[in-house]
Image: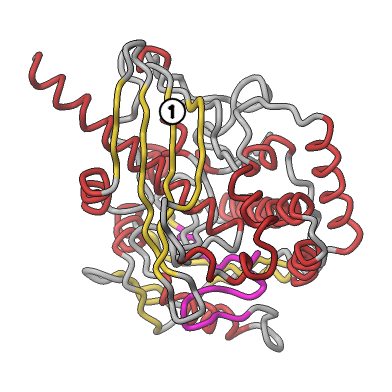
Amino acid sequence: MIEINDTSPDVDVQAVEYVRLLGYPRGWVLRDRAKELADWARGWFSTHGRPWVYAREAGDLQIGDHSITVDGVPFTSARVRNTFHSAGAHSAILIAASAGPELEEEAQARWRDGKPDEYFFLEVYGSAVVEHLVTMTGARLCAWADGESAAVLPHYSPGYPEWNIDEQGRLLELIGRSYHGTLPVQAFESGMLRPKKSLLAVFGVTRHVDRVRRLTDLSPCENCSFIGCQYRRAPYRRTSRASSPELPIAEDVSVETEPLDQNGRYSVSLKALQRWSTERLTLATRNDGSVDAVFQYEGTTCTNMGRPLKFHYHVTLGPRAEGYPIREQGCRPAPGDEGHTSMCEYIRDREAMMASIERERPLHGQPLDDVVRWSRPSSPAGCYCEADSRQHKWGLVLETIHYALAKQARVEAQQTG
């Protein structure tokens, strides 16, 4: 049985992955102040960061009708259960990875010092580090599985679609059973982790390698950015040829036929997207074919007795024939909203916080369809204090717009067909 305990893993975050997480368009090259901040964050972490990874193979896996049970602990994720069942998984590998507490502490110190730019770039670099750790651990597991005539399935985590984040603590306790000492990460009742730049995940393992090759949904390769992996079974779909020519790329779908993936994987249920597109979203098409969208987000502060708050998201898309490129974006409190003034970071430094919200424009310049392939932090907190939480909300907004326009295209096709 495989076990990995790496307290000083190599961290070499690919520039294209960091740029993607920062929200810049595909193929963007950082310059001037942005490059200075990115280099600073990378250098600071290289000197002060203390990342770590722990992974172990579970001794027992049982796949039930609606859940899986790992070493006697049940998990009720339909997505994981169905993936394991389809692949004929016989084993599971549990993983905990973290960028360490030092990055979080430094980012908070920069925020308190009135340096929101340094805070943001360091926070996002922490997310990139965790992604890198999971990617490289996945590569190690693929090498091990290949020697066992087996294949590794995509990793999945509590908080991902169809896996309740409430099971985070249960997974952490299970992972730590074989760890010598106490894993340096905590899970709160809310499911949030500390340090927050941490991830718990499960990889399935199957001896039915032919199923993984035949059904790409069962392959982790499309979401793995490890360049030059000798165990790759499918092309990585989040990278362009210009940014990584060494990696085989999936065939592009021409926007001249249909620019939006009608079978795109959303991070939330279709039922929720249907409701939001009806109740919270307004779409208007201009004479030139561009689209104006306004989305109203409603949430609550995480402290101060959960004050209700509302934010408006404004998005302008280019015409359908151009692939609905995201041309303009903005997020600001709804007119008359007072709830946002009760958020902790607003009280601490309102100018810095509002500047961060105004500056963030994820996927700007990219086709709207990229949102269904956008890997971003899962942070369902109702407030806007943390960068991960704001990225999470932008994802929900863009997915709702994608869903509404894709549905509109289906209706038009039926009417003309």
Residue 276 placement, left or right of 395? left
Q: Which of 167 and 249 is in front in this view?
A: 167
| Residue range highlighted in magenta | 186-205
SS state under label 1: strand
Among the 4 quarters of the image, the one containing residue 229: top right
**In x, y percent, where is residue 259?**
36, 21
Indicate the position of residue 20 as horizontal and vertical percent values: 62, 38
The quarter in which the C terminus is drawn is top left
Residue extending furthest bottom?
181
Residue under pointer 1 = 316
Q: Whole-percent x and y of residue 307?
A: 43, 73
| Outermost right residue | 47
Residue at x 82% of width, y 44% of height: 37
Q: Is residue 306 left or right of residue 230?
A: left
Q: How many marks?
A: 1
Residue 201 or residue 65, whichever sits in front: 201
Q: How crowded is mark 1: few (under 14 residues within 10 Å), some or many (20 or more)?
A: many
Any part of residue 272 in sight: yes
Q: Where is residue 69 in the image (x, y as percent from the top left)?
A: 36, 76
Query: Of residues 209 and 227, which is closer to you in this image?
Result: 227
Which residue is at a point 24% across and 69% down the rendered structure image?
Answer: 66
Residue 59 shows in this picture: no
